[in-house]
Amino acid sequence: MSTPMESSEQPLPGEAPAFLAGEAVQKTNSLALISLIGGILGFLSSCLGPVIFLFIFPVLSPFCLGGGGLLGIAGLVTGIIATNQLKTGAEKGRGMAVAGIILGALDLLIPCLLILLVPVLLVMLGPVVGNVFSEINSGLVVP
């Protein structure tokens, strides 16, 4: 005689465990995941572009900054589309979509801030750099 399965009993082979019976598992929205991945990759590319430009290999820097902008746009757009799709509540992934939107916006703002800040830093540090070079040149003996 079969009895209903109690919570302490193990399920029979082929049966679903009691805690899964009747529960619907929500699927993650694929656009939210794409938005998060694009935002992270674009953010890393935007942040690492100046480092690559200054220290490692200057030729790669424009590709890094451009890639960051393109990935930022992709993360921003797919995140907005995903949040609109997630309003129905059939899927999960709202946090990933919001993170993709934020990182995508930062991907677009970082190059703009660099374009604005580099000339300001050059103007502020120009006299200091000039003094350093003049002291170095004054100490050099040219034959």
Image (tube, helix red, strand yellow):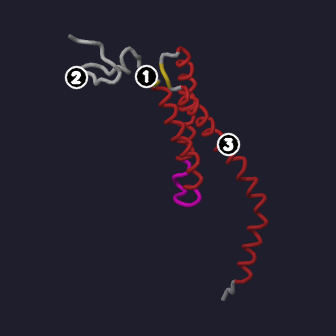
Q: Specify the amino acid type for callout 1.
A: Lys
- Ranked by sequence position, the earlier of labels 2 and 1 is 2
Mark 3–mark 1 Cα distance, whole angstroms, equals 37 Å
Residue 17, relative to residue 124: is it above or below? above
- Choose between 79 and 116: the one closer to the eye: 79
**Quadrant of the image occupied by residue 23:** top left
| In the image, residue 105 lies in the stretch drawn in magenta | no
- Label 2 near label 3: C-beta < 8 Å? no
* Residue, far top: 1
Badge 2 marks a residue whose secondary structure is loop
Q: Which SS type dominates the magenta stretch?
A: helix
Mark 2–mark 1 Cα distance, whole angstroms, equals 26 Å
Q: Specify the amino acid type for callout 3.
A: Cys
Which mark is on residue 27?
Answer: 1
Residue 57 position in % (x across, y down): 52, 58
The label nearer to you, 2 versus 1, is 2
Residue 88, relative to residue 77: is it above or below? above
Q: What residue is disc 2 on?
A: 13
Residue 18 position in % (x across, y down): 35, 19
Instruction: Classify 10 Å Cα crowding around label 2: few (below 14), some (14-19), many (20 and above).
Output: few
- Residue visible at 57% across and 39% down? 69
- Residue visible at 52% across and 31% down? 35
- Ranked by sequence position, the earlier of labels 3 and 2 is 2
Screen quadrant of the C terminus: bottom right
Residue 141 position in % (x across, y down): 69, 87
Mark 3–mark 2 Cα distance, whole angstroms, equals 60 Å
**Is 39 situated left or right of 119 in this image?**
left
- Choose between 77 and 25: the one closer to the eye: 25
Residue 136 position in % (x across, y down): 71, 78
Point out the stretch of residues depicted in magenta. Answer: 53-62
- Ranked by sequence position, the earlier of labels 3 and 1 is 1
